[in-house]
Every structure is written in C-alpha cells, then in structure tokens.
Image (tube, rainbow, N blue to C red):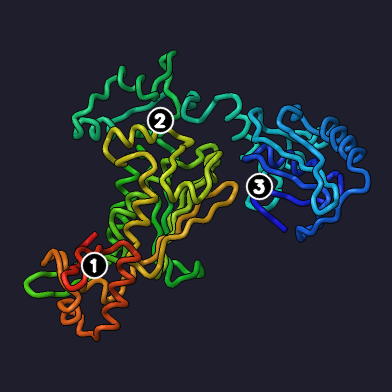
Amino acid sequence: MKYEKLEFKRQVSDTIVKEVVAFANTNGGTIIIGYDDDGKILGLNNPKQELDKLNNKLHDSIEPDVSFLLSERIEKQEDKEVIILEVLKGTNKPYYIKSKGMTSDGVYIRVGSTCQPATSYSIRDMIIDSSDINFEKNISSNQELTFIYAENVFKEKDILFRDREKKMLGLINENNLYTNLGLLLSDQCPYTIKMAVYKDNTKKEFVDQKETSKASILYQIEEAENYLKLLNQVSGRIEGMNRIDKYDYPTESLRELILNLVGHRNYEIPGSSLIHIFNDRIEFLSLGGLVKGLTIEDIKLGSSSSRNPKLINIFHRLGLVEAYGSGIPRIFELYKSSDNLPEILVAPNSFLVKLPKLSMKFEYEIVINYLKDKESATREELENILQLKKVRTATILKEMLERDLIKKEGNAKSIVYKLK
C-alpha cells in the first residue's frame, strides 16, 4: 500500500535507508516495519533486536547525521508488535547514502508515493537551499548589461529605476556587480520562451513556431502574450442589441501562465520555457518542479513560494501580478463554468499546466448573459428564456448554484437568481 508520507516494510532492510533519505530530503514521513506491501500486519518476532539493527544501519549508512530527525518506537497492533519510524523533513540537505556519495545513486527524494533517485539538478537545488545561495543573488557572468526596455517599462509605471533602485531590487549587489536577477531584466537576457503550434492534438506535425527574442524578460512576456493573442480565436453572436464575444481561452489566464512560466522557473536548468498550442488546449511547461514544501493542492488554494522571489516582487511592483499566489486560483475561477478544467502535472524538474479551450454549457451562457442585463430573475422567467421545461430548468439552476456561478435569494415563491 502506497501513501505520499507513509511506507510499509516487512522487516529491516537496506531499502529502508533509501526511504529515510527520501523522506528527509522531501517533506518527512512515517515508515511502519512489520507490514506487507498491501498494508496487512505481519508483526516482528524480535522487535527490540530489529530496532537496534535499524538504528545501527541508519547511523552507519547516511550522511549528514539524521539521528535528530528520527523518532522510533515499538508498538503493539492487533496483538502483534511493529516498529514505527517517524522521519522529519531535514534542514541540511541533501542527505545521501555514504557508500554512494552525493550522486543520483546516493540521493533519493519522495515523488508522490514513490522513492526515486534525485537528478543532478535536484541535488544542486538542495545544496543551494541549504547554503542560502540562489540564482537571483549570484553574480551575472555578463557585466556589460543595459536596461533600455526595463527603464521604459518602469517609466511608464512612474516608478524610479536608477542605480539606487536597482540595488534595492537586487539587480546590483553590494559590490556594485550585476546579479543574475539583473541579467533577467537586462536587454541581454539569454533565456527565451519557445512556442509551437501543432496541426492537431498531438506533436506529430507543427504548423508554426516562434522563439522570443534574447531580450529583457519583460519584453519576452509581452512578445509571448501578443503571439498567443493572435491565436486566441474569438466567436460572437448577437443577443438583442448586444454582441457577445467568446474567446477560446480567457485572456487573463494566458497572461497569468506566461508570468508563471518565467517567474517560477529554475534558471539553473539550461533550456527554454515551452508553450505548446494544440487544437483543444495550450500547454505551458516551465523548467523546475514544485518549490520545496508545496504541493499541487497548496498551489490551487493560493499558497505561494517562489524560487525567484525578487523577480516576482518586481512583477508585483509593476502591476503584472495582482497578489502573491493568486494566479493559479484565479485561473481555476475563470474555468468554473467550463466543462473542461485546467490540469497541473509536476515532475522533479518540470511544471506543466494544461489549459483547455473554454467549453461552457450553452444554457449557462444564456442565464449568465440574461442576469448581467437584468440583474435578477425568477425561475419562471429563466424557463421562458431557456425555452425549457420546469424540471430541466431546475437542474440547470442547481448545477450553476453548485459551481458558484449564481446565487439564490428569497424564500418560497419570492426566490430570485442573481450572478455570484
């Protein structure tokens, strides 16, 4: 039986060393010794002896010392004795198997419910996290930087962007050298976004491709957004005296995901950020997995932690992002009336968001547009507008209430419906 923070083992063995290393390098967890893989209790014949064996094995096999992260006890369950080993999240990463060294053969991490070898990039990230050194603070290898585009953006926002402000923002360090954050904002930024448009819903054949200029990351954001705007088809219909336009994708979500793509990526990993445009969706692939300590569920709820906090701070000052952590929840909010929801997939060194085309039920659109115009309506009025029978109208309204698209006010015969 597999759980994200729980592992069952029949007996003390070398595989437990890998599990302890993985839990210490990730978010901690619990190992119960004396169970089979399906979670069925087997018990241990001599738990005290097994516990001594376990402590010796962990002490002799793992670097740095993990003893202060461990808590073990013998516990009786269903008249059988087992060992409960609790592992805290470590602060001196990476933890590794001594005999293998600080390599992919010796460093393990927890990915979902599995223990997996860490990549060289993951190991480097752990070293950087533990030493409080990060990409943004490091000195740029290019010290011949200009900021023509960034200066114009700051000027348009009426924000000062002199050397003093560059130092405060982190573009220049205390020794008056440009940092990697400065490199990202400069006209010489070497990191790009690659975009490809495919013929159908596979990657077999593409019909167009574009790579952003090697220019300020601020310019690249605009460049990528303008390219996606051209591909974001709009359809319209006339209702009364008004024209109702409907885009394939919410324009706000495209901008949010471009900002997410460049704002949270791991710039230590070489390569470009990628945007794949298919017939039914757009995929945004950012280099670098989840920031330590966060889960997909955390991100959907609005939890925020960036590996490039100074860059995100600049986006915030320029009004490119409204609030920390609000981007992903806002995207899901924009899709709450759609039949297809965005999807987030995470691997150790990549973060993928699949944005489907909007597909709202026609009846939802009619109700929403009517309430925008009239502000409120009774069920009987909506029956007439929808040209549906009472039961079907009630079902539609119930669905819309559950999706928080509308709200109900009043009692009994005085009930009216309004937009949420």
Residue 292 visible in the shown view: yes
Q: Which mark is residue 310?
A: 2
Give left or right: position of 400 versus 261.
left
Please report contact status of discs 2 and 3: CB closer than 8 Å, yes or no.
no
Give the residue displayed 43% in from the left and 40% down from the top.
304
Residue most extreme to the left: 241
Give the residue displayed 41% in from the left and 15% down from the top.
176
Number of residues whose C-alpha sits closer than 10 Å to that of mark 1, classed few (under 14), some (14–19) or many (20 or more): some
Residue at image mark 1: 246
Q: Secondary structure at mark 3?
A: loop
Give the residue displayed 40% in from the left and 59% down from the top.
209
Q: Secondary structure at mark 1?
A: strand
Residue most extreme to the top: 175
Is the residue 371 above or below the residue 289 in the image? below
User: Marks 1/3: CA distance?
Assistant: 44 Å
Number of residues whose C-alpha sits closer than 10 Å to that of mark 2, classed few (under 14), some (14–19) or many (20 or more): some
Amino acid type of the residue that numbered disc 2 sits on in the rendered structure: Lys
Amino acid type of the residue that numbered disc 3 sits on in the rendered structure: Lys
Amino acid type of the residue that numbered disc 1 sits on in the rendered structure: Lys
User: Marks 1/2: CA distance?
Assistant: 36 Å
Is the residue 384 above or below the residue 291 in the image? below
Residue at image mark 3: 5
Is the residue 144 above or below the residue 124 in the image? above
Q: Secondary structure at mark 2?
A: helix
Please report contact status of discs 1 and 3: CB closer than 8 Å, yes or no.
no
**In terms of sequence position, does the residue under pointer 2 or pointer 3 come before the other?**
3
Give left or right: position of 91 versus 80.
left
Give left or right: position of 62 versus 2.
right
Give the residue displayed 24% in from the left and 65% down from the top.
408
